[in-house]
Amino acid sequence: MNDNDTLALLRSIAAALERLAPAPPPGADLDSADAFVWHADGERLEPVPRVNRVPLALLHGIDRARDILAENTRRFAAGLPANNALLWGARGTGKSSLVKAIHAEINGAGHGLALIEIHREDIASLPRLLRRLNGASRRCILFCDDLSFDGGDASYKSLKAMLEGGIEGRPDNVIFYATSNRRHLMPRDMIDNELSTAISPAEAVEEKVSLSDRFGLWLGFHNCDQDTYLEIVRGYAAHFRLDMAADRLRAEAIEWSMTRGARSGRVAWQFIQDLAGRLGKRLG
């Protein structure tokens, strides 16, 4: 056997050994970043190098929800029992911002939680994602923004099994946080329609409505009053060093909210972005 034959044989042996080698442990790539997006198509976790979020100190008017969710997350990070959480309520009131801000705050205190966003349309792939995360050394917050289900959508069953029950259940290193505009994750008119047409109305909607009951924490968010709205605006303006007389800032912020027909953290942030642009200042 010449050298070329020997080299070819060694390469064949190496390839065979590589095929026989055990697969990398589940979640082995979780050390590459603090945040990820789950892509069901291809079953991959895409690292997010920079999370779009605001500091926790800038979130005003949601103190009770902030304290409850922060304490729940600290317990989870410490390996103690903690609850899945549903943050529900009006649009733009800080639900998703709170989840991302608390994740940053907890990690800043020395913990290494991974934040994994799963899109609403990928909920059916939850069992596959959980199998991947099960046994990983890192603790993970699964996060689904704007979660809801409509008629004929059966993907909620995957979430239901994950939250409580199911043969495999939820891995100890995983917790699930979701935001929704709906308290029961399904539109009110669907519930009313099924109640009016079903032979057994209670049973007709119980399975879907009980989904929200499986979250240990329900945190409600509501549109803020004018004082809270102005407090949010002043906090942003001070944080980003946007110089404007207090009376003028107040007047412009109120006018902005009136043109939008709402007062919320999102409206305050949109005003601040407009103000920063007019002042020639960059945010971040």
Image (spheres, rainbow, N blue to C red):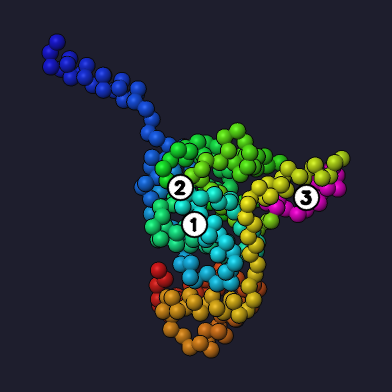
Count residues near mark 3 (Cα–Cα under 10 Å), then give few for <14, some for 14-19, many for 20+. Answer: some
The vertical placement of 73 against 208, above or below, is below
Tag shown at residue 74: 1
Check disc 1 and give the amino acid type. Answer: Arg
- Callout 1: SS: helix
Q: CA distance from mark 3 to mark 1?
A: 36 Å
Count residues near mark 1 (Cα–Cα under 10 Å), then give few for <14, some for 14-19, many for 20+. Answer: some
Q: Nearer the viewer, mark 1 or mark 2?
A: 1
Circles 1 and 2: CB atoms closer than 8 Å? no
Q: Which residue is mark 3?
A: 191
- The quadrant of the rendering that contains the C terminus is bottom left
Identify the residue shown where x is 47% and y is 52%. Answer: 77
Q: CA distance from mark 1 to mark 2?
A: 12 Å
Q: Is residue 256 visible?
A: no
Identify the residue shown where x is 62% and y is 79%. Answer: 226
Q: Return the x and y of residue 69 as percentages of the image width and height.
A: 55, 59
Check disc 2 and give the amino acid type. Answer: Arg
The span shown in magenta is: 184-198
Q: Earlier in the sequence, mark 1 or mark 2?
A: 1
The vertical placement of 225 against 158, above or below, is below
Which residue is situated farthest in the top direction here? 1
Q: Which residue is mark 2?
A: 139
Check disc 3 and give the amino acid type. Answer: Ile
Residue 2 position by quadrant: top left
Q: State the residue in front, 241 or 25.
A: 25
Q: Main secondary structure of the magenta part?
A: helix
